[in-house]
Image (spheres, grey):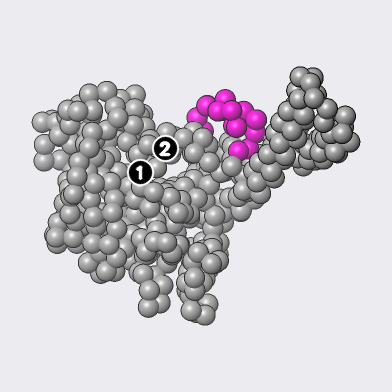
Amino acid sequence: MGLTSTAVLAVVAAAAVALFAATVRFWPRLARPGARAVSGRIGLLLATQLTLFAAVGLAANNAFLFYGSWADLFGQQQELGVVTDHEDGAEGSEGSRHMTRIATQHPDVPGGRVPSAGGRIDKVVISGRTSGVESPAYVYLPPEYFQAAYAGRTFPAAVVLTGYPGTAENLLKGLRYPQTAHERVKAGKARPMVLVMLRPTVAPPRDTECVDVPKGPRTETFFAKDLPEAVAGSYRVGKKARNWGIIGNSTGGYCALKIGMLHPDRYAASAGLSAYYRAAEDPTTGDLFHGRQELRDRADLMWNLENRPPSGGSFLVTTSREGEGNLRSTMKFIEKVKAPARVSSIVLDSGGHNFTTWRREIPPALEWLSARLSAD
């Protein structure tokens, strides 16, 4: 029986109820003094508590799909995802004034203390010239950025987004983007890229869903215009759409796909790991659209594919046959993408909505991004 099956939950819940009943039934007999009676009481209490916690954990996992299988739960699913391509059936000169570097750190890679061997991670604050949004971020510079052979050359760049609420530190430690990028380049499977890592929550604790909220945070403008300008004005990265990609997981995945779809003149490639396809509207988002249906439609990727198909760009979407809740909507998204846009996918056999799954998808996703971006 699978981890997410209702049968497993029913069996564990029934066991918890049975053990509770047994505790009530046999407690008078175990109330007498003596080592055997004490051991019996301890055993019944522990067994009841363990099955109760297991039932609650299984119910929570079934609701939120943290893990898709037993192997996923115990970290035994380690094989990487496989990308499948689906065929159709210059501003920035002012950018340096809108970015402040506040600290640097060494990537956790071999030779990481020497920039030309391990690269460097800058902690920065990006101030949006047009949006007025200000957000902290981490910028990973690959070793090649500091090598004489690459002096004066520009690099492709990718924006990397967490889910909601998320922290940018998760991209460094939990999801290991700099380490994975370093490994892919060393293995000859990707080209060096600059990674700009941050969370999509630019107005915490509010989840703005990367929308330009009327009279509120202009999150879409920040990611589509201000961030590329600021980074290009501070680092040796290209300024054209073919130089830029964007990737994220969960809410960050939705944001990445939406920004890429609505702004193909800024981003040539967009990857959504475990993404959804229309803006969430709940207490964490507040009123995103102020009753304006045209704004709600703009934030619906399926609506855009049907009514305003993108004029280009490449999209990567990921899901799993067991464990993810977005399988059906992802297949629908793939069907709706038409030329000149292109779509690719990673479909795992199993994997929940969690870091274990995303760590399996990030290596091929970075390879996919690298193949679609240009340094010049």
Q: Position of residue 86 (x, y in %)?
A: 53, 44
Q: Residues within 10 Å of mark 1 (few under 14, many from 20)?
A: some
Main SS of the magenta part reads loop
Amino acid under disc 1 = Glu
Q: Residue at x 23, y 62 (%)?
A: 127
User: Could you say which disc has been placed on residue 169 in the image?
Assistant: 1
Q: Count numbered badges in the picture.
A: 2
Quadrant position of residue 363: top left
Q: Residue at x 54, y 63 (%)?
A: 280
Q: Is residue 75 magenta?
A: yes
Q: Residues within 10 Å of mark 2 (few under 14, many from 20)?
A: few
The answer to whether the residues at label 1 and label 2 have Cβ atoms under 8 Å apart is yes
Q: Is residue 280 magenta?
A: no
Q: Residue at x 66, y 49 (%)?
A: 63
| Quadrant in the picture for the C terminus | top left
Q: Is residue 111 above or below residue 354?
A: above
Inspect this view and state whether residue 29 appears: yes
375 horizontally vs 177: left or right: left
Label 1 and label 2: CA atoms lie apart by 8 Å
Magenta highlight range: 67-83
Amino acid under disc 2 = Gly
User: Could you say which disc has been placed on residue 137 in the image?
Assistant: none
